[in-house]
Image: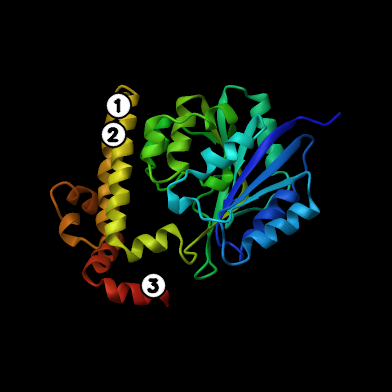
Amino acid sequence: MEQAISVSVICNTFNHARFIRDALEGFVMQKTNFAFEVLVHDDASTDGTADIIRQYAQQYPQLVLPICQEENQFSKGVRITRTFQLPRARGKYIALCEGDDYWTDPLKLQKQFDFMEANPDYALCTCSTVFLDVSTGKKHTKYQINEDRDFTASELILEEKGRVFQYASFFLKAEVFRQSPRWITTFPVGDYPLSINAALNGKVRMLADTMTIYRFNTEGSWTANLRRDPQRAQRIAQRMEQGLLELDEDTDGRYHNIIRQRITLNRYDTALRCRDWKALKSKELRPIYRSKPLSIRLKHRFICQFPGLYDRLRRR
C-alpha cells in the first residue's frame, strides 16, 4: 500500500539554471520516516532551468513532480502557487523553497515535522537562515538565533530588527497555507504576510538550527530591480501599506499601534531606497533617522546625497 504524503514541498522557479541544482539536491537528500513530494513549477525559463528539473524528475519520478510552462504565467498576472501548486499538494504540511535558495540539512523536514506533530497548536515552524550575497560571496548570519523560541504576531508585524523569517525556512500546516484573506493577496511579498497569518491562526516557532540558505543580490532579483527602479519601489511600498491597513481592519484594530509603527518604518525604508533625503528629514521620518547610530545616519545621508558614488563603491 502506498504511503500517504505527509509533506508537500513547493518550489517555484524562473531562470535559475545557476542555482536550481542546489535546491533540488537539498530536497532529494532529505531523510524522513514519512513520505513527501516535491512540486516544482518552472515558469517558462529561457536558460535551461526546465531541462535540469526534467533530469531530476526522471531520476526521482516518485518524488520530483514538475510543471514546466511553455508560456510565462507570472507576466499574465497568474498566481503561480494558488493556481498550479496548491491544487496538487497532498501533504498535511507545506514546506517552501524558491529555486535560487536551498536547504543544507538532510534532516530539515524531519525536525520540523517532528516538532509540528508533537505540538499541534503551532501553525508554523521555521529555522535559522544564512543569507548569501551572490555579488560578493559573503555570508550574513544575523538571521540566526541561539536557541529555539516562539514569535508573536506583534513581533512579526513590526520586524523591529529586520526580516524575521526567510521563505525557504517555512514549514506550516497546509490548512493555514491555503487560507487567503484579502490582505495577504494585497501584499507584494509572500513570506511576510504568510508568517503573520500563521501567528493569527496558531503559535509560531523558530528553530535555532541553521538549515537553509537564502541568496540575495542575484541578477534580476527583487532587491536589484527595486534599486534600479525607484518608481517601482514606490508602487511596492504603496501595496505594502495597503496590505497593512487591510490587516488592521481585518484584525479589528488589535495590532493598530504596531501596524502604524510598521507603516512609518516602511516609509523610511522607501525614502532611503529612493534616495529621497528630503523625505528622510521630514517631520514624520526625522525621529527614526535621529534614533539611529551616528555611523548609520552618516551612511544614509551619503546614500541619498551621493547615490551614484555609493552605487559604484558598493559594486566594488
Rendered image: mark on residue 135: none
> Could you tell which of marks 3 and 2 lies nearer the N-terminus?
2
Work out how far the residue at label 1 is from the one at label 3, CA to CA, in angstroms. 40 Å
* Whether residue 285 is situated above or below residue 115 in the rendered picture: below
Q: x and y percent of residue 112 in the render?
A: 65, 36
Rendered image: mark on residue 245: 2
Residue under the point 38% across and 41% down: 187
Instruction: Choose mark 3 or mark 2, whichever is in front.
Output: 2
Residue ID for mark 1: 249
Secondary structure at numbered mark 1: helix
In the current view of this chain or complex, which residue is farthest to the front?
Answer: 70
Residue ID for mark 3: 314
Q: Name the amino acid, label 3.
A: Arg
Secondary structure at numbered mark 3: helix
Work out how far the residue at label 3 is from the one at label 2, CA to CA, in angstroms. 35 Å
Residue under the point 72% across and 44% down: 107
Secondary structure at numbered mark 2: helix
Kindly indicate whether the residue at mark 3 contacts the one at mark 1 (C-beta within 8 angstroms).
no
Judging depth in this view, the residue of 86 and 26 nearest the camera is 86
* Whether residue 201 is situated above or below residue 286 in the rendered picture: above
Q: Is residue 5 left or right of residue 17?
A: right
Judging depth in this view, the residue of 10 and 166 nearest the camera is 10
Mark 1 Cα-neighbour bin, 10 Å: few <14, some 14–19, many ≥20: some
Can you see residue 292? Answer: no
Q: Is residue 73 left or right of residue 41?
A: left
Q: x and y percent of residue 244 in the render?
A: 32, 36
Q: Name the amino acid, label 1.
A: Glu
